[in-house]
Image (spheres, helix red, strand yellow):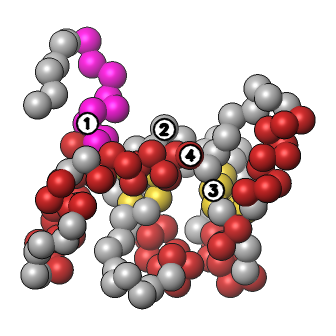
């Protein structure tokens, strides 16, 4: 899953449980649904990832998609936060998005037999999560 700075899902790929995230990195970066405008500066797109993406191949994939990789381990980020308490932690955004997906009980335990049904339900959940993050001038009650 790829999320923006607020935790809103931009891309997701569903695989089997025995697939490592790094093997799907290229597919996730290609499957982005919300395209960004071309940045004004040549290299102003940043991608933060955890230590599992430190490998040479993963960094090459990140850079080939035009991102500047920020691959930081848990301890390194905690040390930086201790030195500067105002520094915003970056690791929580993907975890909070997983938490939002877990609120859709139909997705929490996979009951769907067909992969396309499960993928479609995940995309509907991602659309609902993204819609809830849009700032609107009207008062909407979420059910």
Residue 133 highlighted magenta (yes or no): yes
The answer, for residue 139, to whether it is visible in the render is: yes
Q: Position of residue 94 (x, y in %)?
A: 49, 52
Q: Which residue is mark 3?
A: 47
Quarter occupied by residue 113 = bottom left
Q: Which residue is mark 2?
A: 6
10 Å crowding of disc 2: few (<14), some (14-19), many (20+):
some
Q: CA distance from mark 1 to mark 4?
A: 20 Å
Q: CA distance from mark 3 to mark 1?
A: 23 Å
Quarter occupied by residue 17 = bottom left
Sooner in the amino-acid sequence: mark 2 or mark 1: 2
Q: Position of residue 42 (x, y in %)?
A: 71, 51
Q: CA distance from mark 3 to mark 4?
A: 14 Å
Q: CA distance from mark 2 to mark 1?
A: 13 Å
Q: CA distance from mark 3 to mark 2?
A: 13 Å
Location of residue 60 with respect to 78 vertically, above or below: below
The answer, for residue 63, to whether it is visible in the render is: no
Sooner in the amino-acid sequence: mark 3 or mark 4: 3
Q: Which residue is mark 4?
A: 92
Residue contact at pointers 2 and 4, CB within 8 angstroms = no
Screen quadrant of the N terminus: bottom left
10 Å crowding of disc 4: few (<14), some (14-19), many (20+):
few
SS assignment at label 4: helix
Magenta extent: 129-137
Sooner in the amino-acid sequence: mark 1 or mark 4: 4
The tally of labels here is 4
């Amino acid at each position: 899953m790829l999320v923006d700075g607020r935790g809103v899902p931009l891309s997701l790929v569903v695989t089997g449980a025995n697939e490592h995230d790094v093997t799907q990195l290229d597919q996730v970066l290609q499957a982005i649904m919300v395209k960004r405008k071309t940045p004004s500066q040549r290299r102003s797109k940043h991608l933060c990832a955890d230590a599992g993406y430190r490998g040479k191949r993963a960094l090459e994939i990140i850079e080939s998609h035009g991102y500047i990789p920020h691959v930081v381990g848990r301890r390194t980020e905690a040390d930086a936060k201790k030195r500067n308490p105002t520094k915003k932690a970056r690791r929580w955004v993907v975890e909070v998005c997983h938490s939002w997906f877990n609120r859709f009980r139909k997705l929490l335990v996979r009951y769907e037999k067909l992969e396309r049904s499960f993928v479609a339900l995940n995309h509907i959940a991602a659309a609902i999560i993204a819609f809830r993050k849009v700032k609107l001038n009207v008062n909407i009650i979420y059910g």
